[in-house]
Structure formats: structure tokens, C-alpha cells
């Protein structure tokens, strides 16, 4: 039994943690949010200099050739500091998509630049308020060009390349393909869209005959590709959620120890104690599920989809709850603009929605469980 | 059992409705009209409307006529409120003054003070705020630290209040201070009325997480008040404050956010779960059912209270449950409405989001609503203690002098 | 606004309460449960002598001709004492069914005997573990005879007459009719079935060519009739649930005041205080919904179905929660056979299932809300 | 990351499996076989099996060989447990004795006592029970009232214990008593070992709500024990008891009831909601997902603990969450399984109900499981205090002599 990260992975985690504690305190998140910056450039640069963007990209494409486990420990720390950087869009999603499904030529074209942090990538699926589903994707690809409107797209303004879900004709899942769109090549306009968490910039991406090519060789495989990309994303985001949960729980605990009411620490009241115990319980369940997700992702295991869904469900539940009850623990002060509580409240909900809401993932999970149960 | 008025109530309602029809516009007929967004304009309109109500006997309906009130009954007050809610009229800025401050002045102020302040407040000429909460206080209101020190016939006040609603436009306020730190905390307090326009009073708005700023911090730097501004004896401030807090109307708890189950049904028809209409998803349907049942439960609990009022009885403690249920429902329903929009749920833009952005706004707002005017936890304590008769929490500071009680930072 | 019971109704409630407090303490419920009696005969006799069985039955059929509101106040008290009597089967369901839908002759035949308490009636719908639905009713009616197996049937051994849901051919809801079966007329056998609450006897009713007639004039109306009968039942049972909730909450509160741990009353700990506050909140929501249900039932109002469903959902939630957390408040002693906590735990779940589980009623409610919303 | 054994672990597992194959029947091959229902037969079988294990070094694997143990590691103990779970063997009746009582004797008993008791207990020749809980105690174990009074070289014991598991078949027990009521409660306790067959000890079974009776009340009427039966000094009983309680193995929390999400999927395929297969109902599916995620979370939390053990580390406090989650899940899942059967859900008959009646039984059993060995509320306190470092509850009885502390009836 070795259900833990290796010493090397833990050391990497510690490095990232130190860097972020130093360079990315909540004042940075606040600055990005208040000034509506695209992202914290100096933090991004630091992460790039540490080589983190290349972590899981093969050496032949300029990366470090490490695996998913290394990405997981980085994700946990990015989550802990609610870092305002395009790491998830560019690395968990875009780079992974090209690595998994791109042709050799596509990999050569994009992975080195993503690995080096020279450019940022993203994935564009959603078209408004309808959940991702073959039926809900109207962006069209034909004759090497994409037209359609994607909204919201995380880091869409910063990105130079996007993996875009498109309809290439046909029925059901077979209608969907993924296209690589060079966002600097014309036919692309982007307009910022206001979200609940302005520390992570989102845009509406309008594509009008934007030059594009299909990811990989064949059309019609986009839906299953997307599903696999999202499974990986779910695991990685769940580590961000675990990190965020820990940070919110720590804030709540520190405040509960320091704040007095009626002559004693508010942390001595059972209403607060049990609230924080519940946060802890949810956090541990999320962490354990995330670990299994990490193992399945790293091994490309047969239970990846179930493990990813479980990670996402538990992670979303833990972080949303912890962020919410952290404000409640703080009382009035926690609801002010001055308080850092808001950053977790915003980020927790953003993470819970950004690659699909838990209710959708529960459907995905139970469909798998049904199939196994029938077998 | 019926929802009908008694004949007397019906007659009063008719009279109210006729007066309102003459003097205001029904919301149903007010298409495109809205109340001014500019604060000064809003205050001006509010004052004009309040004066009109006072002239007609509809301001402070239950107060005696000699104080400018309507000389009516509690149920008449409720009926007026029900009817007025159908009209586009400004309201709210006098609620704290007339609901909490002036009753305190009436109970504890000198004759001069009453003569000076009650009538102008009823007419809306002067607006009042309540200055109790402090940064160190929170749920523990009596743990306040703002000092008032006697200096001849005056008191010199230094300290800070927080969460003062409307402080930036109020004329007067009632202020709870600590005048003796050497006795247990509830025993060393004294209440004053103060002039909010005094230069020794500085008001700073508090920006909330939502972006709004309806509340203020208020700082006192050597504010000097006359001893005649005292309400009640020195050291009796907590007793005086209880008068104020008892008058804190059960009206709270109304807000459940803007989006409710009807909106959710509409949204669920439009969006999908696993590719199928969300309205066909059993989990969505269960939530709609549960929140509908909660909303109905709150509505009919209110009707039970009104029935008691209508019979001249004092309502039971049922209404204390309202905010416990409503605030959490507001947060959860908002959050779930966002979930149904999936990735699109992160958007915060009234023009792009369903129900005019109501889900997102109430998800954000509820994080504050669950705290304001009594946290979920304090309200449960209140139900447990006042309704069920369970013991209070252990109070380690009960007998300690205030300046020796543990306070943290 | 007069959203309350009348003084007369309150007086009736007080009488029933006094009688049950005196004659039906928990020792009686315990006796019936432990000795597996069909019901507490002396309590039933007392209720009959007070004329309560005839409350809502018209005077021309030997009843008092009062309305649903009077039944509601009786129900609340029966619920409070967890009374082991067949009142609900006989009066809320069987008598109401015949009163609402029976022919003049059927009313004359059965209502006077039900009103006088001379006989007991019941309703038999369920056929095992499948929820009531036209598709799930296999008992057949043809040529004046019914055959089929109904399970579980409350008070089936004590009953002399049953309203039985049967399939009379045709499709969908039109296939269902309600039959009146004289249980003493042959072709009927009943065998006790063990349930979670042996203080209310249930049986498996096996009908083999049992003589029967259709309730009312016409076949094929059974499903809508049953729906209306269950709406009424839901309101009346919700008053039992409110009464039961109050009793469980009182037990918990008394114990929390009397029991000490670590030198103070356990009711001074917030974990207990807030638990009891939550019980109270649920109880008030249930009560207010039940009141509206009572009004709609009494007035045969257009919102009866919604109000009934809301009453049932809130009542089930309140009583199940209060009964469960009453045990938790008592700790170990609450889980012993000697403790009275068990009676509420059993009864709460029984009431929540007996005319259909909340999940089914939520479907019924939302279907109505959808229709209104569309209108 | 992997679930594989280290080479050493794999070798040990192989050896264990071979031994078990030789000496017991795999559950998979045990169709129709079951353990005896008769208590005496079960005890006889249990003793025989325990002796066999002891001979092979598989009883008390982590204890030194000189005490009859296996001289092995914690992870070997875990591996043995994992493997044994696949075989139809009796277990459980020695758990409290070997898990809690004998470790206490080993830590605090005299050399004679250790020599006399440890080896026979390891071999299963003698069975032990733990006598701490009292009717007035509950979560407040140290609030016990059973008195022991010194009389020459003996102590005379009077009082009552409750919830004593296995008292009706045990040979010996460790008994916590109050020897000084004039000092604060934790300071006046003393521990003894006692002979459960003494006529001054009366055991009465407690019938539970479920109908079962695994626990007992135990009454002491002038039970005389020698001073040499004392474990630890007079007044040190609480310190001694902590040794026992620390040994209360994290093993608890395993039971989540018999029915789990796989059963629920099967049931949901069979039954209907609103006439459609329940498995298509989104609310049913969400519950399946949530409980699956909880079960996985608990399983992998255990794996994290095992990994720490495997590396020779002391596991962190993760495992404390197990029972908090498992007990409530057991109750809710049971209850919901009953709901899915609709009216038929009231039936309590293994022959008629799905999953062999498991939903109903676990709904009933969980009402006790949420209390036994630490209520939900106490466990949350433990997490808050020991894991998160929050302050303990205010202890009003901390410094009071026991006989002056408030106790109620």
C-alpha cells in the first residue's frame, strides 16, 4: 500500500507553496480582482521560471516529462492561494488536450510554447447557460474555419490558442469535434464578460470564419475527447478545491481562536466547533477522493471517469461549503469588501461551475455505476 | 378558517385603498416608472411621502394622535402595510428611526426631548439611526467599547461604531456607550441621543462583498454631548437598549431573494441536465418541491401571526423562525440556480443571466443576510432559549468587570 | 384574516387531548406493540363513545355532520399520543371515500356503521414494494368479484370493509377502479405482516373471487378518486405528524433539561440547543402548511392537491427528523426497548410511508406547479 | 501511488493466506454455511479459533512473543485482518478484552497480574469486558457514581454499570470506580480488575429498540475486591482509563450498514417513482452519487491511514471522521431505501423486503450506531478540539468536588 505522494512530489509541493506564499498572497488576488487585470503577470512569470508550466509535457516537446501526480500537487497549492493565473486553462486543459489527442505536428506546433509559458492556451466549450452536451454546441466548423460564439471562456483574452468544441455535422456525439484555433490568426474577437470571480478573467469569444484545424486526425471524436479532457481537469481542479478548502478552513479556525464574544473565543461555541468539524470532514473526503483520482489519472486507470467524477463532486462540495461557512464564522466583517473571505467564496463557486456543475457530474458518475452494476 | 377581513378590517382596508389610489401609483400601472436612484432625490421623495402619510394618519398608525401617529390598531397597521406594498412609494429610510430609535426616546427621554423629536420624526422631517454595533461586538452587542466620560455637565465620547444603516444621511442617532468599565459589561453602559451632523462625528461607508454600501462605520473623536441628552440613568444603558431591540420588528425575514420556485421552474424548462430538460430531472423537482413547501410554510406562519393580531392577541414566537429558513433558502436557491446554468452560471451580468441575474445576486447577498440582524447561530439560540426554554450558553464574563473580561485582540 | 381553528374546534381538541392523555399514555402503545394486539380496544371504544368516528359523516348517515377541520384537530391529538387505533384507516380514508364517491345505497349501507364505530374500514392499495401507480395495480375486478393480493394493508384484520384499488381493464388511469369489498363475505383471507411499527397492525390481504361492488356508479374513475382520497388523507395525516412532532420535541426538551453532562444540563450545549431549534422550525413549517391543507380540504378548494402535498412533505420531514433526533438527544437510553423514544421513531416513518413516500408526493406537487406556471 | 504491497508485505500476505486456506473456509466457498446462532456454541468455536491463531502467531500480532503475541508490525496486523475478513471465522468476542482491557492490565497491573492474565486472554481462554459507562454518565464518562470504599485490605464496591458489551459471558472485567467524591470528578477515580463470576456481580441484558440484546447492565452489591486488584494508584483511575480509551481502536467506523449504493441501484431499477423506474429519477441518482462519493472517501481515507502505517508512521487524525460520516449515511441510506419501497417500506420481514431486509434493519440499527462509542456530537467535538485545536467546551464542574457538581436527577 503506497497511497501517498512521493518525497520528490512533496518537495515540489513545498517549493510551489513557498513561492506562492511569498509572491501570491491575497493582496495579489485582490489587486487583480479590483483592477480587473487579465491575470497576475509577475506570479505567472515566476511559475514559468520554475518550469511548472512544462511539468507534464514530454521532454521532446520542451517539457519536464513528469506526470499527473506532479500536476496535482501544483494544483493543490494554486488552489490554496486562489492564484489569479491562467495555469488551469493553459496546462490542465489546453496542453493536456493537445498532448492526448493532437497529431505530431500539432504537438510540435503548440506544446513547446505552452510548456515554456511563452503563450497561454484555453478550452472553449460553453455557449451561454446551457450545460455542455452535444445538443448544446452550435459553433460550426467547415472548410478549415470556425464560426460561433463561446461564452464564458476562461482566460480567453490572454490565450493565443484555444481548443474549441465545434459541430462538424452528423448526429449525437458524432457531431462534435474539437478544433485548434490560433486566436492570433484573425476572425477572432473577444469581449470581457463579468463573472462572480473577477480575479480570473473570462471573455465572450466570437469566431467568424476563424482559421482552425481539427485536433488529431479525425472529425467526430470530439465528444469522447472532451470527456477525457474534462476527467483530467476534474481531478486537477479537485486538488485546487482541496487546497482552497484547507485555506478557508484555516482562515475560519484562526478567526475562531482570535475572536471573542461573551468573554470567550467564538471557537469554544459548539455551533462554531461543529461547523468547522464539518468543514474538516468534507475536506478529508474530498482529499481522499482526489488522491484516487490522481492515481487513476496518472495510470490512465479503468476507473478514471468514476474517480474523476467523485473527486469533482467531493471537491466542489467541500470548497463551496468551507468558503460559505468561513464567511459565516467571521460574521459581518467577513461580508465586507475589505475581508479576504470573499475570494474563497467567489473562487469556490467558480471552480464548482467552470468545467460543469456537480449535478451534471453526478449523472456521468451514476451512468458509469449503472453500467458496472449491470455487468 | 378563511383569509377574509372582519367587517371592520374590510372597511379600513377600503379606506386605505381609496386614499392610496388618490395619492400614489399602483405598481401594476407603473410600467417603466421607478424610484429615484440618486440618494438625495430618494430622500426628498421619501420625506414628502411620509409627510403626506402623517397628515392622513397613516404614519405610525399605532401611535397616539398627540404624538403625530394614527391612533389605530396593530392589525390596521398590518393592513396598511399590505396595501401600500402594491404601490410604487418610497419607504425604508425611516424604518429604524421610527421602529427603534423614537420608541426608545419616548420611553426614556425627557419631556423636552419627546416634544422636540417625536413629531418631526413621524412626519419624516428628521431621520434617525441606531448606533449600537461595534467591530469588537458582533453578536455580543453589550461587549462594546465606545467610551463616554463625564466632564462637568457634558460627556466626552470617543470610539467607533459599525454597521450603522443610513448614518450618512441621518440627522440624529441613539448611541450606546460604556461609562463604567469597572463593572460587569451589562452594567456599565449609558445611552444618549446625538446630533449626527456634529463635526466630531465622522461617517465612512462600508463596502460589502456584493459591491453595495448601505452601511457605515461611525467614528467619534471627542464628541461632546450634554447630560440632558442622556436616555435613562447612567449604567442603565443595557436596559434602555433592550427597549430598542424589543422594538426591532418581526418584519425582518421577509426577504427570500428575488428568485423563487416559479423562476426555477422556468429556468429548469430552458436548461438541461445530461442533455435532457432540467425540469424532468427528479433532483431538480425535489428541490422545487422542498423550497415551495418552505415558502408556503413561511407565508402561512405569517398568516397565523396576522390572525393572532387580528384577534387582538399577541402573536406567539412562531415568527422567530422566519429568517432562519429564509436566509439559507435564499443562498441555496441562488446557488442552485447558478448550477443549473452550468459553466454559464459564473456570469454576473443582469443582461446575460436569467431572471435578471437574480440567482447570482441572491447567492452573494445571502452570505450577508445570514449574518445581518442575528446570525443563523444566534437565531437558533434565541429559538432554543426563548421558545423552548433551554438554558443560555455558559457566560464566563457574567460577573467579571468589563475591563477584566477576556476579549482577544 | 382568520387562519386559525374556531373556539369550538379548539375545545374539541382539548377534550380529545385530555381523553388520550388519560386513557392512551405510551404504556398503552407499548402494550399493543409488545402483545401484538390488533389495536387498543378500550381506547377505540372511548373514541367511539365520544362520537369522534362520526365527526365528519353527515347526520343523515348517523354522523355529527361536522367538517374536515374537526377531523384535523382530532388527528393532531391522535398523532401526539401515537394512539394505536384504526381511526385513520376507518375514518380519514374508508369513510371519506364512501362519503365522497359512494352511491346513496353504498352510503346507507356503510356510513352509519363506520360512524357508530360498529365496524372498522380500511383502504387497500399497495401490492408490495411498488409505489401506487396505475401500472402497479394488478388486483382484478370482474363479474362482481375481486382477486388479488394487497400488501401491506393497515388494520386489515380489524376491518369489515375495504376500499380496494383494482384493475378493471383499459389503459392508463382509466384501468383503475375502486371496489368496496365486504371483508366478512368470503373469499378473503388475511395474514399479519410484520412492520416497523407493530403498534399499528398490518396484514397481507388475499382476495379470491371476493364479492365486491364498484364504489360509485362508474368503472374507470378509481385513479382520480384515489388521488382525491389520498389528498384528504395527506392533510389529516399531516396533523398526526404535527402532533407527533410536538410530542417528540417535548420529550427531547424535557430530557435536555433534566439530564446533566459535565456538570450542566445537556440542553445548555449548542449542539443540543440548535438541534431542538431545528425541530421547532420544521414543526412550525409543517403546522402552517397543515393549516392551509385543512382550509383547502374543508372548502374543497382549488389548491387542495398542492396544499395536501405540501402538508405531507413538511409533516413527514418534521416528524421523521424530530423522532430521530429525539433518540439522539437521549443518547444510549433512547435506543433501549424500555425507552418511549422508539414509538415516535417507528410511527414517524410509518406515517411518512403509509399513504406514499414524500418523493412520490413531491412529483405530484411539482406536476401541479408546472401546470400552474405554464398557465 | 499504487495499492501494491511492499515485497515484505506481499510475502507476509502470502504466508497468511496459505495458513488461512489450510485452517478455515473462504466465504466465497462457504455457501449455506454460517456461524452458530447459539451463543455457547459460538463462544466455543471462537475460543478454538483464537487458540489456533495464537499457536500460529496470528493472535495479537503486534504484541511481544513472550506475552503470547506475534511479535509483528502494525501493518502485518492490518494485512492479517484484511485476509481473515475473506474467511468464515468467528471473531469479535475478544475485541474489547484484547483491544482495551489487557493493554490496561499490561500498562498498570502488577507483575503477578500480567503473568496470570495476559497469555490466557491472548489464547482466548478467558474473555474480558470493560465496565466504565453508567446510566448517569453517557458522554461524560468520568461523571460515574459507582463507589469503592476501602475496608482493610479490601475494597467494597456498590453501584451500576451500563452498556457493558458481553458481560453475560465474560470471565473478568476492568472496573472504574469513584473512591473519593470530595475532589473534582477526574481526580477521585480508581480502577480495578474484577471477577465477573463473583456472586456480588449481577448481569442483566439490555433489550434494544432493534430487538437485539448485545449489551448489559451490571450491578454490584457489596462486591469485595482485594487491594491487589487495583490497577494504578487510588485516584489515578482516570489516567488509567485513558490508557484503555486510547487503545479503543480506530477500527470503529467500518460498519456502514449492509445495503450500499450497489444495492440501491438494484432496488431503484425494480421500483418506480411517479410510475417510472426510480433509477431514472434524478434525485435518486444524486443520492446514489453522493453516497458513493462518501463511501469512496471513507475507503480511501483508510488507505491513507494504512499507507502511513505501512511506512511505519503514526497515522494522522483523518480516521476520526469515519464514524461521523458512516453512521449518518447508514441511517439516511436505510431510510431512503424504505422510501423507495413506498407503502411497502413499512414491512419488516427479511423474506418480503429487498436486500434481505437490510434497509429497514440499518435504519433501525443506525439510531443506535449514531450514539454508541461516541455520539455524532461528541465526535464533532473531538475533531474540533483534537484535530483543529479549538478550545474545549466550558467546564463548569472542572474544579468542583464531585459531590457538589450539578448532576440533575
Image (cartoon, coloured by chain):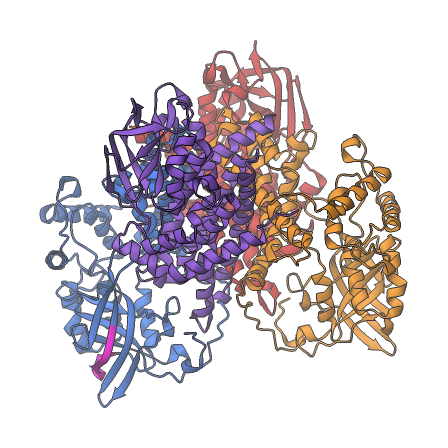
Chain colours: A purple, B blue, C red, D orange
Foreground residue among C164 and B227: B227
Name the spot of residue C237 as percent of width and height, x first: 50, 38
Q: Please give the count of numbered marks on the rendered protein.
A: 0
> Which quarter of the image is occupied by the C terminus of chain C?
top left
Residue C189 is covered by the magenta coloring:
no
Residue B104 appears in the picture as rendered: yes
Foreground residue among C141 and A12: A12
Q: Is residue C355 left or right of residue D239?
A: left
Q: Is residue A162 left or right of residue D191?
A: left
Which residue range is magenta in the image? B219-230
Name the spot of residue D266 as percent of width and height, x first: 60, 29
Name the spot of residue B150 as percent of width and height, x first: 27, 87
Q: Quadrant of residue B290?
A: top left
Residue B227 is covered by the magenta coloring:
yes
Q: Quadrant of residue B167?
A: bottom left
Q: Quadrant of residue D203?
A: bottom right
Q: Residue at x 58, y 20 (%)?
A: C181
Amino acid at each position: 500500500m503506497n497511497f501517498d505522494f512521493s518525497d520528490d512530489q512533496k518537495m515540489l509541493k513545498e517549493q510551489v507553496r513557498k513561492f506562492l506564499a511569498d509572491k501570491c498572497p491575497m493582496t495579489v488576488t485582490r489587486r487583480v480582482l479590483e483592477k480587473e487585470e487579465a491575470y497576475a503577470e509577475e506570479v505567472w512569470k515566476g511559475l514559468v521560471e520554475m518550469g511548472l508550466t512544462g511539468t507534464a509535457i514530454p521532454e521532446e516537446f520542451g517539457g519536464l516529462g513528469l506526470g499527473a501526480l506532479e500536476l496535482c500537487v501544483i494544483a493543490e497549492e494554486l488552489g490554496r492561494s486562489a492564484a489569479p493565473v491562467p495555469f488551469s486553462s493553459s496546462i490542465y486543459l489546453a496542453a493536456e488536450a493537445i498532448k492526448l489527442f493532437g497529431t505530431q505536428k500539432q504537438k510540435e506546433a503548440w506544446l513547446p510554447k505552452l510548456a515554456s509559458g511563452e503563450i497561454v492556451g484555453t478550452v472553449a466549450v460553453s455557449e451561454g447557460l446551457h450545460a455542455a452536451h452535444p445538443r448544446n454546441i452550435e459553433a460550426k466548423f467547415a472548410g478549415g474555419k470556425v464560426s460561433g460564439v463561446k461564452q464564458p471562456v476562461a482566460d480567453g483574452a490572454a490565450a493565443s490558442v484555444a481548443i474549441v468544441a465545434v459541430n462538424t455535422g452528423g448526429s449525437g456525439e458524432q457531431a462534435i469535434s474539437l478544433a485548434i484555433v490560433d486566436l492570433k490568426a484573425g476572425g477572432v474577437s473577444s469581449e470581457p464578460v463579468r463573472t462572480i470571480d473577477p480575479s480570473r478573467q473570462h471573455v465572450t469569444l466570437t469566431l467568424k470564419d476563424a482559421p482552425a484545424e481539427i485536433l488529431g486526425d479525425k472529425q467526430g471524436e470530439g465528444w469522447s475527447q472532451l470527456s477525457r479532457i474534462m476527467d483530467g481537469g476534474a481531478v486537477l481542479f479537485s486538488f485546487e478545491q482541496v487546497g482552497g478548502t484547507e485555506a478557508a478552513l484555516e482562515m475560519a479556525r484562526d478567526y475562531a481562536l482570535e475572536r471573542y464574544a461573551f468573554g470567550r473565543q467564538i471557537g469554544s461555541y459548539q455551533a462554531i466547533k461543529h461547523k468547522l468539524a464539518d468543514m474538516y470532514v468534507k475536506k478529508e473526503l474530498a482529499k481522499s477522493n482526489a488522491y484516487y483520482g490522481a492515481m487513476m489519472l496518472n495510470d490512465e486507470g479503468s476507473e478514471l471517469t468514476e474517480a474523476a467524477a467523485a473527486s469533482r463532486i467531493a471537491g466542489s462540495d467541500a470548497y463551496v461549503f468551507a468558503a460559505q461557512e468561513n464567511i459565516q464564522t467571521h460574521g459581518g466583517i467577513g461580508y465586507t469588501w475589505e475581508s479576504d473571505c470573499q475570494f474563497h467564496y467567489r473562487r469556490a463557486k467558480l471552480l464548482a461551475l467552470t468545467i460543469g456543475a456537480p449535478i451534471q457530474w453526478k449523472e456521468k458518475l451514476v451512468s458509469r455505476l449503472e453500467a458496472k452494476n449491470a455487468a | 378558517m378563511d383569509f377574509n377581513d372582519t367587517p371592520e378590517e374590510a372597511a379600513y382596508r377600503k379606506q386605505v385603498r381609496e386614499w392610496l389610489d388618490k395619492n400614489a401609483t399602483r405598481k401594476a400601472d407603473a410600467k417603466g416608472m421607478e424610484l429615484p436612484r440618486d440618494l438625495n432625490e430618494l430622500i426628498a421623495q421619501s420625506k414628502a411621502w411620509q409627510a403626506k402619510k402623517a397628515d392622513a394618519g397613516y404614519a405610525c398608525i399605532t401611535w397616539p394622535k398627540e404624538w403625530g401617529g394614527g391612533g389605530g390598531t396593530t392589525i390596521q397597521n398590518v393592513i396598511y402595510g399590505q396595501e401600500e406594498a402594491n404601490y410604487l412609494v418610497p419607504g425604508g429610510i425611516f424604518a429604524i428611526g421610527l421602529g427603534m430609535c423614537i420608541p426608545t426616546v419616548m420611553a426614556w427621554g425627557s419631556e423636552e426631548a419627546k416634544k422636540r423629536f417625536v413629531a418631526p420624526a413621524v412626519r419624516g422631517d428628521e431621520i434617525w439611526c441606531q448606533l449600537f454595533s461595534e467591530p469588537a461586538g458582533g453578536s455580543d452587542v453589550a461587549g462594546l467599547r465606545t467610551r463616554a466620560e463625564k466632564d462637568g455637565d457634558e460627556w466626552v465620547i470617543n470610539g467607533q461604531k459599525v454597521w450603522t444603516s443610513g448614518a450618512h444621511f441621518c440627522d440624529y442617532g441613539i448611541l450606546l456607550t460604556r461609562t463604567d468599565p469597572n463593572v460587569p459589561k451589562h452594567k456599565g453602559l449609558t445611552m444618549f441621543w446625538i446630533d449626527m451632523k456634529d463635526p466630531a462625528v465622522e461617517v465612512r461607508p462600508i463596502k460589502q462583498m456584493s459591491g453595495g454600501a448601505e452601511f457605515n462605520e461611525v467614528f467619534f473623536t471627542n464628541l461632546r454631548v450634554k447630560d440632558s441628552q442622556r436616555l435613562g440613568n447612567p449604567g442603565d444603558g443595557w436596559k434602555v437598549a433592550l427597549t430598542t431591540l424589543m422594538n426591532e420588528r418581526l418584519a425582518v425575514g421577509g426577504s427570500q431573494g428575488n428568485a423563487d420556485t416559479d423562476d426555477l421552474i422556468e429556468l429548469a424548462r430552458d436548461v438541461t441536465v445530461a442533455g435532457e430538460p432540467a425540469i424532468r430531472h427528479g433532483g431538480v423537482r425535489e428541490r422545487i418541491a422542498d423550497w415551495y413547501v418552505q415558502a408556503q410554510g413561511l407565508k402561512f406562519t405569517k398568516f397565523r401571526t396576522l390572525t393572532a393580531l387580528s384577534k387582538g392577541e399577541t402573536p406567539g414566537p412562531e415568527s422567530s423562525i422566519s429568517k432562519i429558513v429564509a436566509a439559507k433558502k435564499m443562498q441555496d436557491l441562488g446557488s442552485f440556480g447558478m448550477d443549473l446554468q452550468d459553466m454559464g452560471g459564473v456570469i454576473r451580468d443582469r443582461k446575460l443571466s436569467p431572471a435578471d441575474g437574480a440567482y447570482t445576486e441572491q447567492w452573494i447577498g445571502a452570505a450577508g443576510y445570514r449574518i445581518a440582524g442575528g446570525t443563523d447561530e444566534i437565531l437558533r439560540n434565541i429559538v432554543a432559549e426563548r421558545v423552548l426554554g433551554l438554558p443560555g450558553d455558559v457566560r464566563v464574563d457574567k460577573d467579571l468587570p468589563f475591563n477584566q473580561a477576556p476579549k482577544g485582540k
